[in-house]
Amino acid sequence: MAEIGETVLVHVVGTLDDGREIENSRLGEPLQVKIGAGSLLPAVEGALCDMLPGDRRRVRLEPARAYGAFDEGLVQRVPASSFPNAANLPVGAYIELVTKMGPLRAKVVSADESEIVLDCNHELAGHAVTYDLEMLSVVHDSAIQRELHPEGCACGCHKLKEQLSNA
């Protein structure tokens, strides 16, 4: 089984309940994922920790374990005067806003001469997602790298593995 810190090759196909595909590595190369690095949802990484090469698994995630519940509080109304060229904002498209806390991606819900409505939820918020996983291989590190995290080491990687399995 894959351990925290190991790299795996995996095919991932993600679909919504309505059948829309949100991700499909089978259309190209398999994903190379370092377990615990956070490149996939924690619950998906946790499932990968319980798989061996050749294993296939289907993981269904309710919104809370996927991209979160839809939060009406993240739909904001702002004066059109806050945006240069407000009339030209692409309704239905995503724009990137610069904030004090860093970049923020928001969907332009509507825009007119007086007001702009922005939805700052993740685009998949409120959706359950099903992931079909196939573990192709574990990319083994050198013996030196492997010794950095022997069974029962004190670095805390076992705590991360517990968190991923509970996600």
Image: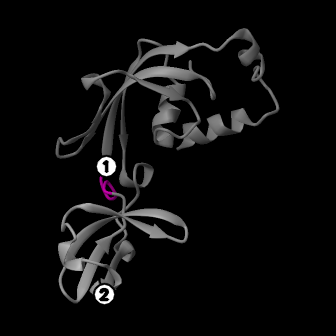
Q: Residue at x 60, y 13 (%)?
A: 140
Amino acid type indicated by mark 1: Ala
Q: Residue at x 48, y 40 (%)?
A: 43
Q: Secondary structure at mark 1?
A: loop
Characterize the magenta stretch by its predominant secondary structure.
loop
Q: Quadrant of residue 134?
A: top left
Residue range in magenta is 123-127
Please, is residue 25 above or below residue 143 in the view? below
Residue 74 location, x and y as percent? 38, 72
Residue 144 location, x and y as percent? 76, 13
The residue lying furthest to the right in this view is 154
Residue 50 location, x and y as percent? 52, 24
Q: Residue at x 41, y 12 (%)?
A: 54
Q: Nearer the viewer, residue 117 or 6?
A: 117
Q: CA distance from mark 2 to mark 1?
A: 37 Å
Is residue 66 part of the magenta span, yes or no?
A: no
Q: Which residue is mark 2?
A: 81
Callout 1 environment at 10 Å: few (<14), some (14 to 19), or many (20+)?
many
First in sequence: mark 2 vs mark 1: 2
Q: Residue at x 31, y 39 (%)?
A: 130
Residue 118 location, x and y as percent? 30, 73
Q: Secondary structure at mark 2?
A: helix
User: Which label was assigned to residue 36?
Assistant: none
User: Which label was assigned to residue 128?
Assistant: 1
Is residue 126 part of the magenta span, yes or no?
A: yes
Amino acid type indicated by mark 2: Ser
**Badge count:** 2
